Amino acid sequence: QVQLVESGGGLVQAGGSLRLSCAASGRTFSNYHMGWFRQAPGKEREFVAVISRSDGSTIYADSVKGRYTISRDNAKNTVYLQMNSLKSEDTAVYYCAAGPIMGIPFMIDYWGKGTQVTVSS
């Protein structure tokens, strides 16, 4: 089992920035590729970004490319999502996820419980 706990969400004005963190515990963090997803009210959960477990390669959704950066620190068992130039449409619950295979669609073994990000216009 891997437990994932997100933090760093909150209320921010449009154009602002937030940094989300996801702390992992349990099985070896470095064995998993790590991703972020989000779900806005009334919408399906959607892919945001993924980072590989070893070489740092990344994939982003077109909607966040150039504004968001995913990174990880295997020594701290933590994955991050730096979000810049936030827009009202970025408002959602953001979920951390761990999966065994790098790629899109990102296959998920474990989910976190999410952290709310609200962008005011």
Image: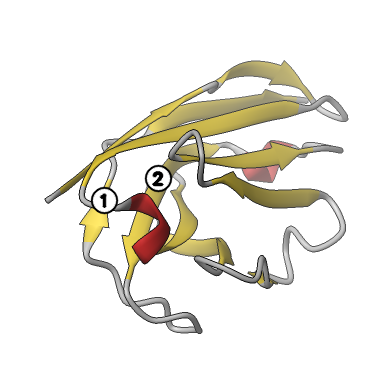
Residue 95 badge:
2
Across the whole image, how many numbered discs are drawn on residues?
2
Question: Which residue is at a point 40% across and 47% down the rendered structure image?
Answer: 96
Furthest residue toward front: 75
Residue 20 badge:
none
Q: Are marks 2 and 1 in contact (CB under 8 Å)?
A: yes
Q: Report the amino acid beneath label 2.
A: Tyr
Mark 2 and mark 1 lie on one chain; the one further toward the N terminus is 2
User: Could one spot residue 44 in this view of the protein?
Assistant: no
Circle 1 crowding by C-alpha within 10 Å: few under 14, some 14–19, many from 20:
some
The quadrant holding residue 20 is: top right
Name the image quarter holding the C terminus.
top right
Q: Secondary structure at mark 1?
A: strand
Q: Could you tell me how far apart the alpha carbons at marks 2 and 1 are, in whole angstroms?
A: 7 Å
Q: Secondary structure at mark 2?
A: strand
Where's residue 116, x and y in %?
46, 27
Q: Report the amino acid beneath label 1.
A: Trp
Left or right? Give the position of 78 relative to 91.
left
Furthest residue toward left: 1
Q: 116 and 72: which one is in front?
A: 72
Colour scheme in the image? secondary structure
Name the residue tied to disc 1.
111
The quadrant holding residue 24 is: top left
Where's residue 115, x and y in %?
42, 29
Vertical side of 2 occupied by 104: above or below: below
Question: Which residue is at a point 71% across and 18% down the rendered structure image?
Answer: 12
User: Could one spot residue 28 in this view of the protein?
Assistant: yes
Q: 74 and 99: which one is in front?
A: 74
Left or right? Give the position of 90 relative to 85.
left
